[in-house]
Amino acid sequence: MPIDLAKLKRAREKAGLSQEEAALAAGLSAERQNARQRWNSIETGRKSDVRISTIDRIAAALGVKAGSLLK
């Protein structure tokens, strides 16, 4: 699913979370370093094939609706 990168970053910053904190809250990885790297790859667009289930977890961690993160 295509994520709007600017919306994702704004939502994370509005939630007051670092990339690592957001990634851990979304359950992207159990390991801190891997979680931050995974979030960064999504937020910078290096990983563009993000599953809807992952988008749902990210949205829940940020306290927003999944649709608000999409293009």
Image: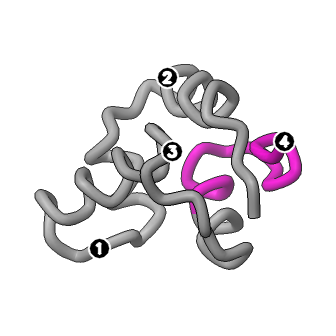
Mark 1 surroundings: few (<14), some (14-19) or many (≥20) residues within 10 A = some
**Amino acid type of the residue that numbered disc 4 sits on in the rendered structure:** Lys
Going by the image, does 33 lie left or right of 25? left
Q: Nearer the viewer, mark 2 or mark 3?
A: 3
- Which residue position holds label 3? 45
**Amino acid type of the residue that numbered disc 2 sits on in the rendered structure:** Glu
Q: Residue at x 67, y 53 (%)?
A: 59
Residue 67 lies within the magenta run = yes
Label 1: element kind: loop
| CA–CA distance in space, label 2 to label 1 | 20 Å
Any mark on residue 13, and which?
2
Query: Is 24 or 48 nearer to us in this picture?
Result: 48
**Amino acid type of the residue that numbered disc 3 sits on in the rendered structure:** Gly
Of the image marks 2 and 1, the number of the one nearer the N terminus: 2
- Which residue position holds label 4? 71
Mark 3 surroundings: few (<14), some (14-19) or many (≥20) residues within 10 A = some
Mark 4 surroundings: few (<14), some (14-19) or many (≥20) residues within 10 A = few
Residue 32: quadrant of the picture:
bottom left
Going by the image, does 65 lie left or right of 42? right
- Which residue position holds label 1? 29
| CA–CA distance in space, label 2 to label 4 | 18 Å
- Seen in the picture, residue 11 relative to 21 is either above or below; the reply is above
Considering the whole magenta stretch, tell me its main secondary structure.
Answer: helix
Q: Are marks 2 and 1 in contact (CB under 8 Å)?
A: no
Label 2: element kind: helix
Residue 1 lies within the magenta run = no
What segment carries the magenta color? 58-71
- Seen in the picture, residue 10 relative to 4 is either above or below; the reply is above
Going by the image, does 19 lie left or right of 58? left
Label 3: element kind: loop
- Quadrant location, the C terminus: top right
Of the image marks 1 and 3, the number of the one nearer the N terminus: 1
